Amino acid sequence: MTNRIDNTFEALKQKKEKALIGFITAGDPNISGSLNIITAMCKSGLDILELGVPFSDPTADGPVIQQSSARALKDGVNLRAVLEMTGRLREETSIPIILFSYYNPIYAYGAKAFYKDALTAGADGVLVVDLPPEESDEMTSQWSGNEVALIRLVAPTTPLKRMAQIAQSASGFIYLVSKTGVTGSDGLDTEDINDKIELLRSTTKLPICVGFGISTADDVAAIAAVADGVVIGSAFERLIEDNLDNPDLASILANKVYEFKKATKLMGS
């Protein structure tokens, strides 16, 4: 089976570009609208999609993503619906799809069934926000293979020894959180982020992607100069929230993807 994540980073490296990774809550503002939005984003330059599983208690997320989860849950979106969406998106795009979830929905679904159904749907990886390496055997021991990458999070406060422990069990890429706090909060210290990336690079050969607080093309360019990928979530979800009744919502998101993707190409220009 082709590893879309590895292939994507290799292809971007050849083009001297960095990965634009977009997070969208599946089913926001509703399933059909979400499919239209995400398809448009994928066709406008998104390199990797993080498809968020809506959750009732998203403790790591700021108000914008919390509200996006609430809208999706109100429309009846659960993990099974997200997997069905993944299958439909796979018919429209070949970019890697990462399922972004808290552990509770996977636990309730069943780890063995989740792995099988995620692979069948065409998912390439999973990021479980609240499942540290010490606890993840409970999930991965029930997986029938290793074809679904397990993306790991590293916090800005993580010491070097702990970085190495986390990186050891990661695959796909490492998600470096840019700062303490929740998603959508303002302010980036690029010098500090660069220092953290250099530390993390000493522990792993996996690509390092940075997320949290990235909301402008200038932010994207600054992070792209030092990381392998840039993760954006709240900025996209804020656009959805601000344009819920706008018939051009998909085009608005597509244009924003185009703008951000252009900023990842500055290193090669």
Image (spheres, helix red, strand yellow):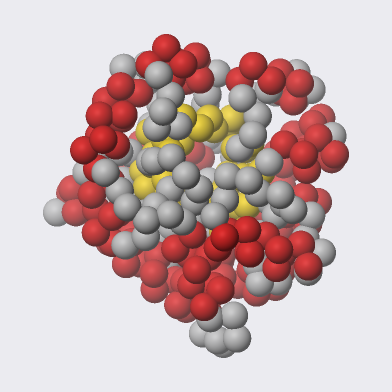
Could you say which quadrant of the image residue 258 lies in? Answer: bottom left
Judged left or right of residue 220, residue 248 is right
Residue placed furthest toward the front: 181
- Nearest to the observer: residue 128 or residue 36: 128
Query: Which quadrant holds residue 14?
Result: top left
Apparent side of residue 99 relative to residue 199 in the rendered image (left or right): right
Indicate left or right for 9 with 95 as reference.
Answer: left
- Visible in this render: residue 87? no
Above or below — where is 43 with respect to 55?
Answer: below
Residue drawn where x is 35% and y is 23% of the image? 200
At which x and y percent is residue 54? Answer: 70, 54
Q: Tell me where residue 191 appears, x and y as whole percent.
A: 21, 38
Query: Relative to 130, is 43 above or below?
Result: below
Q: Quadrant of the C terminus?
A: bottom left
> Where in the figure is residue 93, as x and y percent of width and height?
55, 57
Q: Is residue 268 left or right of 112 when viewed as pictured?
A: left
For the point 46% across and 30% down, the residue is 154
Q: State the image quarter where residue 209 is shown.
A: top left
Q: At x 51% / y 32%, what residue is drawn? A: 153
Q: Residue at x 63, y 52 (%)?
A: 52
- Figure quadrant of the N terminus: top right
Total residue callouts: 0
Q: Relative to 124, is 90 above or below?
A: below
User: What x and y, as percent, mark residue 51?
Assistant: 60, 52
Q: Residue furthest left?
A: 269
User: Visible in this render: residue 209?
Assistant: yes
User: Depth check: 51 or 128 in front?
Assistant: 128
